[in-house]
């Protein structure tokens, strides 16, 4: 599957892309890339705990900690005179959370099992 295409930064157009393509476009932006770097760094600490004790973590926790950290991404970008636009990688869209988690596991297969996952497209239990 070819996932290369142009990310417009236009909310009306880009939000209609299929999920994985939307995620790939997002991490190709300056902000999306910096946010994913932070997610990988934050996940590392939990990975060490998982390796030592077998204790899993909710990716939602890492996602929300990251949401709180985004102000630093904005500050760094501003120093570099990079214009910050919400759909250019500087906001966390919850629709992308599961793709971000799968991306972390793809980059660090030894962390498989650390995050609780469900199959894509499955209904939530009791939902």
Image (tube, rainbow, N blue to C red):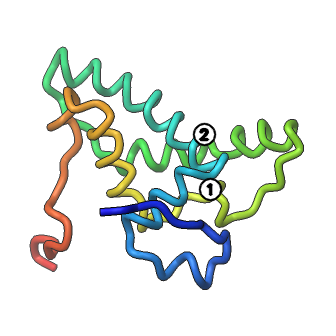
Disc 2 is placed on an element classified as helix
Disc 1 is placed on an element classified as loop
Residue located farthest toward the left when viewing the structure as drawn: 125
Say if mark 1 contacts mark 2, CB within 8 Å. Answer: yes
Q: Residue at x 47, y 66 (%)?
A: 22
- Callout 1: 10 Å neighbours few (<14), some, many (20+)? many
Q: Nearer the viewer, residue 113 or 126?
A: 113
Q: Residue at x 40, y 61 (%)?
A: 3
In this rendering, position of residue 84 left or right of residue 124: right
The quadrant of the picture occupied by the N terminus is: bottom left
Q: Which mark is residue 34?
A: 2
The quadrant of the picture occupied by the C terminus is: bottom left
In this rendering, position of residue 4 left or right of residue 74: left
Relative image position of residue 94 (x, y in whole percent):
45, 64
Q: CA distance from mark 1 to mark 2?
A: 9 Å
Relative image position of residue 87 (x, y in whole percent):
65, 66
In this rendering, position of residue 84 left or right of residue 23: right
Q: Residue at x 39, y 50 (%)?
A: 100
Q: Nearer the viewer, residue 53 or 30?
A: 30
Q: Nearer the viewer, residue 32 or 52?
A: 32
Q: Earlier in the sequence, mark 1 or mark 2?
A: 2
Q: Which mark is residue 73?
A: none
- Callout 2: 10 Å neighbours few (<14), some, many (20+)? many
Residue on which the image places disc 1: 89
Above or below — where is 90 with respect to 127? above
Q: Residue at x 42, y 42 (%)?
A: 62
Above or below — where is 58 with respect to 13? above
Q: Nearer the viewer, residue 14 or 79?
A: 14
Count of marks placed on residues: 2
Above or below — where is 98 with respect to 5? above
């Amino acid at each position: 599957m070819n996932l290369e295409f142009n990310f417009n930064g236009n909310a009306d157009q880009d939000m209609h892309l299929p999920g994985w393509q939307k995620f790939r476009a997002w991490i190709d932006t300056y902000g999306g890339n910096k946010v994913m770097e932070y997610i990988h760094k934050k996940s590392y600490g939990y990975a060490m705990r998982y390796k030592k004790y077998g204790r899993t973590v909710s990716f939602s926790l890492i996602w929300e900690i990251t949401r709180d950290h985004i102000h630093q991404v904005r500050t760094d970008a501003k120093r570099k005179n990079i214009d910050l636009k919400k759909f250019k990688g500087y906001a966390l869209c919850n629709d992308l959370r599961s793709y971000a988690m799968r991306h972390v596991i793809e980059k660090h297969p030894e962390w498989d099992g650390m995050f609780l996952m469900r199959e894509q497209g499955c209904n939530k239990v009791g939902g």
